[in-house]
Amino acid sequence: MSVVPRSVRRIMAVLASAAASSLVLTACGSGSTASGSGGGSLKGQSITLYSGQHQQTVATLVKDFQSRTGIEVNVRSGDEAELANQILQEGPASPADVFFAENPPALTTLEEKGLLAKVGSSTLAAVPSGDSSAKGDWVGVSAREAVLAYNNGKLSAAQAPASVKDLASAAWKGKLGIAPSETDFAPIVTRMIKSDGEAATKSWLAGLKANGKVYDSNEDLVAAINRGEVEGGLIDHYYWYRLRDEQGASGIHSALAYFKPGDPGSLVDVSGAGILAKSKHQAAAQAFLTYLTSKPAQTIIATSHSYEYPLAAGVQNTKVSRPLKDAGAVVPASDLGDGKQALQLLQSVGLLS
Amino acid sequence: MSGLSISALHAAHGHTTVLRDLELRVPNGALACVLGPSGCGKSTLLRIIAGFHRPASGTVTVGGRTLNDDHTQVPAERRRIGCVPQDGALFPHLSVAANVGFGLPRAERRERVAEMLDLVGLNGLADRHPHQLSGGQQQRIALARALAPRPELLLLDEPFAALDAALRAELRTEVATTLRRAGATAVLVTHDVDEALAFADLIAVMRDGRIVQCDAPHALYHRPADTGVARTLGEANLVPAKLAADHAITAFGELPLTDGASDTDEDAVVLLRPHQLRLSTTSGPHTVEARVVNSGFRGHDYRLELAPDPRHELATPLIAYTPADAPPPTGETLHIAAHGTVHPLAPDQVPPDQVPNSATA
Amino acid sequence: MLPLAAGLVALLVACPLVFLGLQAGQSGWATAARLLRRPLIGTLLWHTVSLTVMVTAATLVLGFGAAYLVERADIPARRAWTVALAMPLAVPEFVHGYCWVSLFPSVQGYWGAVLVMTSSLYPLVFLPVAATLRRSDAAAEEVARSLGHGRWATLWRVTLPQTRPALAGGALLVSLYLLGEYGAFAMLRFTTFATAIYTEYETAFDTESASVLTLVLVALALLVVCLDARAARRGRVVREGGTARPCAPQPLGRWKALATAALASVTAVTLGVPVYALVYWTARGNSSTLPSTSILSATAATLGYALAAATLATAAAVPVALYAWRRATRLARAVERAVFLTRALPGIAVALAVVFFAIRYAPAAYQQPPMLVVGYAVLFFPLALTAVRASLAQVPHGVEDAARSLGVRPLAVLARVTLPLILPGLGAAFAMVALTASTELTATLLLRPTGTETLATQFWAYTTDLSWGAAAPYAAVMTALSIPAVVLLTRRTLGTPRTPKGVR
């Protein structure tokens, strides 16, 4: 009976795609032994984490962090966009100390409003500099990659396009699926604007609109590709892995293809965390970010059910078929900005309202 | 003083003035009746006395206690004034006994409820619910409920209007008897003159938000202040007359004045009730010739409408009652004589603020 | 006292509107004009309006038809049908949505949305209409028959107009719900104006623009509320005295089988599909290794908050409804109607408004349990008000005055006369709010105390990670918890079937 937001939209999409099998969530690997950052004097403090990230992974991370540092973490899980809106409304009185987002635009929005504190330099140094805010207001923690998922009953690996630009060609008419309202989509548009200019991007988007069927979420889209409703579509890689867990190998009729390195579609999107400028627990909050980028935390991410790439050097996600470095040079997250220009373009062609 | 006393009462609903400069006194133990057409403000008057409506100004005292004046507005629950509304307004979720005992302290309840049910003759119905009662029974229970806390004053708002004619007549006599036995002071509001005449010791005739005359029923019937009151109390023939020291000179000859003397005005209108007119087939010294226009059988008599000969300059029709054994046929010409005393009437008074604008401009 | 209490409640309930006004006020006309000129806005507005009109019409037809059959026709097992027809209310709308899409992937777009929303919302029309039909006096219909009208003409010219206030009230709730709804449509791949609002909140993080767009919804809601006021006024039924004689069921003859089959198919579509899917889920979900304590604590939290919210919303509805009922002034009616506007607001707007005001004016209560309870009460106040208002309309005027003239103080009059008389309405209000609050998600996520999980948030947490097997029990428990509320609601709205009294 309630008015339901995007969070439920996600539930529905997931449920819709999940009618044929069940899944048991296994606890994430937690056997890491390396020690996190010291928190001796901070022991007994508590911080509040607003998390839009994968819940089970965050729960495992928090548990490990608490046992290492004695700092208690109150986790408020929710949809990242809703949490960002909540922080904006709360203003300086926000009870949040740390915000852990799924995508950069939410963090960049807070950064632009001056709501974030600087992240410690050693923490920033733990991950490649391009994966964090250029101003040092938030730090990258994990990454996901934009890919083309295609139905392998209808398309072969060889037919997969090398560039995301090809999807606007007439060959894809009626075969393409897109989810332009997803936060992962706008960064591709932003990159296209940077590489090809606004006019070309606009006509590309118009091509996508003409070719494509618009889905409301990536979960929805990947399920539609898998059952052959459309032949292929742009998603983040982990949706396909989660679908595979969900459906079992026998239920999978789709595969992933990657755009060539340097292509606007070959995008690595970062999930990061920042500290609220008005937080009264700056030290404990810094300790948490330091932990997130530490090897034990990165290992938890690499082995979790979230299928994201860890960012710290020397940690690999072995559950994902292609290593992150194959994607080529990563565009600095800060180059993507808050995505306003991309958004306006999407709205002007009518892909977004 | 005891009893109900209202003076200089003004009241409004929003921007509409409902009561203006209203005066009313009801002595202790009297059954008074406020009689007037619907919309004259009589229900508002009752609601003000009960404390449900706040007057614009004026005072209301009951038994010497001031309930309303410029500084006071005693809330309804502290007025000790009982109410019997038109529909009874029994509490549908409570039994008859619980309804009657509603206003009583717990300790007194059982005894007083039995007493009150005895008083209204319904002591077998204590456990019934309102919807299981007939309309007459509901009104009796409403009366018992209102009387139970021994109010100083009882207000009845057209309490018999929803009942059929026979029951209405029976119940109003019964209620009047009950109230007299209980020694209650009561104000009943009605538009039904028969009800007022049968019920009240005192009738206050209300028109356009004020009491135009308040007196005993008999006095009011025979000595109405103006033509409006005369008509309100019953059918009236208004006859032009010239007044002399102790009589009026009319088309029916010289008729003695009810009150003996008057301020020898030149022209006036006097009241002749229909039963003061006698019909005859032969003319006499002071008879008026008239033609029967309409006749209606009423069981005990006939009611005739008569068109008098135009040269008498009388209003048409004249109303007369004639015994049931000799109904004159319609169209027949008769001769009318008048007897008894007559009462000079003032014209209807129009309140100053109701004079049309054109007159004041 | 009463005007003060009613005013305070109205002010509290109007908070979201004030918030929207404040936010939208910061954006200016130029921005507003730019927002509204976007290519998709017009299309989405049309989607919203056409869907609202269609679904409202469909729920009116279905709700009235079903109510007429169970209250006026000689259908077998009428009481059982009544409960079955009200039961879709127990199924949270995301369960409705999921069931359809998972079993019939082709159910999507405009007609899919019409089908799913109609089958989940028609009880909002069915219940009040059935209640009106049950209470109405047989005399009017008998007179119509004696004036030479056949059964159909009587139905059209007498029975239907009698139920007009109930139809108007149901249509109001249905259409306001549709205006602000987003999630269920997203699932059915149907975009509405609310989509544009969510884009501003969740993709652009732009509260001001979102508020400007939301005010467009408020304007639509205002239109709906005014239309409803007109419809209800024209159809006001005046009947004095509480001794209506119930109508005898009409023999349907050879149409009986067809009518029963129609009811059966409505129930199969609106109830059978969700039940089938729930059973399917639960059967599939038994492989999940869910810690049973968590579902217990989530159930306890859900129940606790739903009951507290139901209590608060019902208590808050009493002064507003009483004030409007006693005064019947233009202002009182306007206040009463204005609170309905919040019903058309997207949940996120209401929740952010509560965040905005709570952190500024009640920081001690921020993210504490009372804040969530207040948030629910603000969101679902119109539901409570509708029920309380309907039952107050049945109270004979004058009983309160009579009680006071017997020397009883106003508060005692309330306790001894008015509240007992509107007890069924209070029960219906309580059940409706509890039912709705127990499945609420958006506001819950934003307003709950950190660390608190309800059935809805846990369900959401599992399903966003595709662990739908683990999520299944939460949906099942949510639905099971709602069943008593629906039964209570049905009883309270309809009352127990009356036996003819007086003449025996």
Image (cartoon, rainbow, N blue to C red):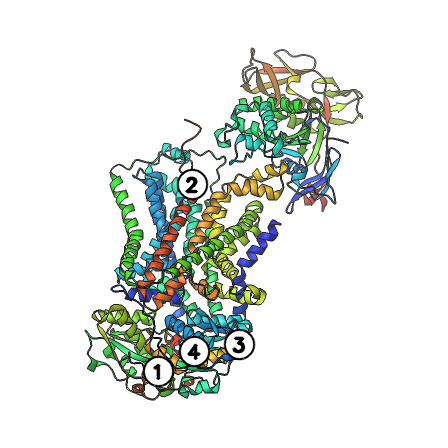
Q: What residue did someone put label 2 on?
A: C495
Answer yes or no: do the residues labelled 4 and 2 have beta carbons within 8 Å?
Answer: no
Residue C331, percent across and down? 57, 52
Measure the C-alpha gap from mark 3 to mark 1: 32 Å
Q: Which mark is residue A59?
A: none
The reply, left or right, for residue B12 in relation to residue A116 is right
Q: What residue did someone put label 4 on?
A: A105
Tell me if residue C414 comes above or below residue B297 in the rendering.
below
Q: What residue did someone put label 1 on?
A: A268
Amino acid on which the number 1 mark rests in the picture: Val
Q: Chain of mark 1?
A: A
The reply, left or right, for residue A171 in relation to residue A219 is left
Q: For marks 3 and 1, give the one nearer the viewer.
A: 3
Judge if badges 3 and 2 mark residues of a common chain.
Answer: no
Q: For marks 3 and 2, give the one nearer the viewer.
A: 3
Residue displayed at 55% across by 47% down: C322
Measure the C-alpha gap from mark 1 to mark 2: 62 Å
SS state under label 3: loop
Residue A285, percent across and down? 49, 78
Amino acid on which the number 4 mark rests in the picture: Pro
Amino acid on which the number 3 mark rests in the picture: His
Judge if badges 4 and 2 mark residues of a common chain.
Answer: no
Q: What residue did someone put label 3 on?
A: A281
Residue in the foreground of this view, choosing between A297 and C432: A297
Residue A277, percent across and down? 53, 78
Q: Chain of mark 4?
A: A
Amino acid on which the number 2 mark rests in the picture: Gly
The reply, left or right, for residue B140 in relation to residue C501 is right
Residue C329, percent across and down? 57, 48
